[in-house]
Amino acid sequence: MTRWLAQALAVLTLASGCSISEIGMEQGDERTVNRCASASECGGGVCVSGACQGRQGQFETLLFEVLPSGGTEARAAGRTLITTTALPLGGGALTLDVLPASRLEGQVSLAEDSDCVPSVTTDGKLAVSVTLTPSEQVLGLEPKTFTAVTPLDAQGHALQPFSLRVAPGDYDIYVQAAPDAAVDPRCLVGPQLYRHQHLGSGNFKLDLQVPPPTVLAVKIARSVSSTLSLDGWSLDLVDASSGRVIAVPTTLGSPGIAGYEARLRYLPVIGGAAARGGTGSELVRLSPPPGVTAPTLVWERAALELFELGEARIDDLELPAKPVSFEARVVDERGNPVEGASVSLVATELLDVMPGLIASFTLKNRLTDADGLIKEALLPGTYRVFASPPSSSGLATLESSWSVSTAPVQAGQELVLRPRSSLSGAVVVGWGPGELLGVGVHAVPVPLESSSPELDRLLGRRPFMPRASTAVLQLDGSFSVPVDPASYHLSVRGESEAGFPWLVRPYVSVDGSHAEEPLGQLELPLPIVYELSLSDGDVPLAGALVRAYIFTDVERRYTPDPSAARSVVQIAETRVDGGGRGRLLVPALLD
C-alpha cells in the first residue's frame, strides 16, 4: 500500500498489520519503520520477522569496501576491497574475511658511496618520508595512502626503523626528503619510487637502501642573437606512469656561451611498470619560477637523447607568444557582479608553440572582486574556463572556453552564471509502512575515470569536478536537490536501522538549461537482506564501516563481470557491531 505521509498517521492507525514506530521522539521527529504482518503487505516481497524483504535481487557481484574503526583492536588496517561473486540473490548469511594487516617495519639508508649530505628538517633532524600508495586505482575510488617519517644520522644511516600497519596488497613506495627538509643540492635522499611491491599479511622487514644517483646532463642550446631567458627556471624529471618526481629539481642559473646546462640527479624507478616502460619513458619538465607568466614545458626523455644516452639536448627553444593583460567579469543573468567566484583556466592550445613541444599553462582558483572582475596575465591561446560561485549564491558552476589574442590589453569577456537547477521528484513506498520521512537525498558527481593518462593530469587537462549536493525528503515524499551541470549518482538513503534500503538512480545527467530536472515518481525497492559477519581471521572486526558497490560497464549498466567494469556505484552502507556483525540492506534493483 502506498500513501503520502501527510495522511499516514490518520490512516495507519486503522490499518491492520502496519504500524509506525516513533524513532527519536525526544527530538520531536517521527520516522517510519519497515514492518509487516504478512506477505500481502510487501508488494510482491515476503514478510520475514515482521519486516518486508525482496524475494530475489539483481546483483550477484558486489564490491565491498571495509574501513576498520579507528579504535578497533582488530588486526586489519586501512581500507580493504573485497569482490564477491555468486552472491545469493535472495540474501542470507554473508561472511567477509578481511586479511590481517601487513605490519611493516623498515628503514631507509643511503648507499655507502653516496656523495651527498642528508636532508635536515627545520628542527635540525635528518629525515626522509616514506609513502605507500596502492599500485592499482579502483574505478574512481580515492586511494588510501600511508606515510611515515624516519630519521637518519649525519652519514645517512637509519637511526631508527619506521613502522606502519597497512592493508595487504600491491603498493608503490615513494621515498623522498621530509616535507620540511632543506635538501643539499648534491644529495638525493630520494626521490626513489619502487613500483608494485607486494605486501601480504603478517610481519615484513623492509630495508630501503637509496643508491647513488644517475645523472642526466641537460643542455638547452640557444643562438647568440636569442633573447630567451630561462634564469631561475626549474628542471626536473617525472615518472610518466605515476606522476611522481624522481629527480631533485635543479634551478637554472645564467647561460653560458652555448646556452644553459644542468645536471639532473635522479633515481630510476624500480619494479612494476618501470621494467616494461624502460629508461627513456620519463618526462623532462621545465617550469617557470613563481611570478613569471610562462608555460610549463614537457618532453619525453627519449626524444631528447637521440645522439647520446645520458645527455638530453634541447635545440632552438623558443617560448610561445608573450603574455597579455586580460580582464573578465563574472555576473548573474541580471548582470549583477558575482563576488568571490573561483575561476580556473587551463590552456588547451597556446599560440606559437614549437612543433613537438608540449606546453601547459594553468591558473587555479582566482577569486573575483566586488565588481565580479578577475585581472590576469595570460598567454595567447585557447582556454577551458571553470567558474564556481559561492555556495550561498544559489548559482551554478559554469564551464566555458575563452580565446585570448595577442593584443596587449583585452577586456570585455563575461561569464554569465545561471541559478542552479533542481533534481526533483517524489519517493513512494509500495510496500510495508508506505512512506519515508527525513531521509537524505544525495547527488554525488560521477567520479573521474582512474585511467586518465598521467600526462593529462600534469598538463591540467582532466575534467573539472562539480559540487556534490544533498537534500531531505519532505513530508509528502518530495525532494528537490540543487545541482550544477554534470552527471550524478542520485541516492535516497533509507536507514538500515529502520529496515529500508537505498534507492539508487545512477548517471543522471543535468545540462543546466532548465530550472528543474523532474525525475517523476521514484519507488523505493524492497531490500535484499544480508546478515554480515566480518572478521580478520578469527578476530571480529568490531565497528567497521562496510560499503557495497556495483560494477558498471562502458554503457553505464550493471555488469557482474569486474573485468568489464569502467566504474562503480555505491548502493548500500552499514556499520557492524562490536562482534563484527551487522545487516546490509541491498536494493533489489536500480531505479
Image (cartoon, rainbow, N blue to C red):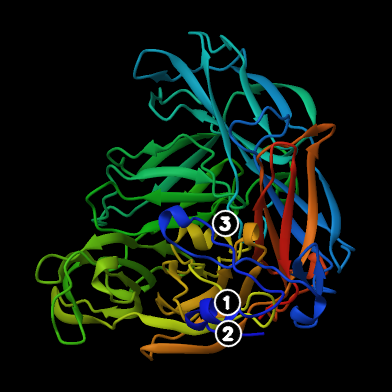
Q: Secondary structure at mark 2?
A: loop
> Which residue is identified by label 1?
435
Along the line of sight, the residue nearer the viewer: 323 or 369: 369
Q: Secondary structure at mark 3?
A: helix
Cα distance, mark 1 to mark 2? 7 Å
> Which residue is identified by label 2?
3
- Marks 1/3 in contact by CB < 8 Å: the verdict is no
Quadrant for the N terminus in the image = bottom right
Disc with the residue nearer the chain's start (2 vs 3): 2
Disc with the residue nearer the chain's start (1 vs 2): 2
- Marks 2/3 in contact by CB < 8 Å: the verdict is no
Disc with the residue nearer the chain's start (1 vs 3): 3
Cα distance, mark 2 to mark 3? 69 Å
Q: What residue lies at 13% left-to-right and 78% top-to-bottom?
A: 411
Left or right: residue 403 compared with residue 221: left
Q: Amino acid at mark 3?
A: Ala
Q: Amino acid at mark 1?
A: Glu
Q: Is residue 464 in view?
A: no
Q: What residue lies at 55% left-to-right and 74% top-to-bottom?
A: 490
Cα distance, mark 1 to mark 3? 65 Å
**Relative height, residue 408 to residue 26 (above, below):** below
Rendering coords of residue 192 (x, y %): 59, 33
Left or right: residue 491 compared with residue 50: left
Left or right: residue 550 compared with residue 446: right
Tell me which corner region of the image, top left, top right, bottom left or bottom right, holds residue 182: top left
Rendering coords of residue 462 (x, y %): 48, 66
Q: Secondary structure at mark 1?
A: loop
- Marks 1/2 in contact by CB < 8 Å: the verdict is yes
Along the line of sight, the residue nearer the viewer: 133 or 486: 486
> Which residue is identified by label 3?
303
Tell me which corner region of the image, top left, top right, bottom left or bottom right, holds residue 113: top right
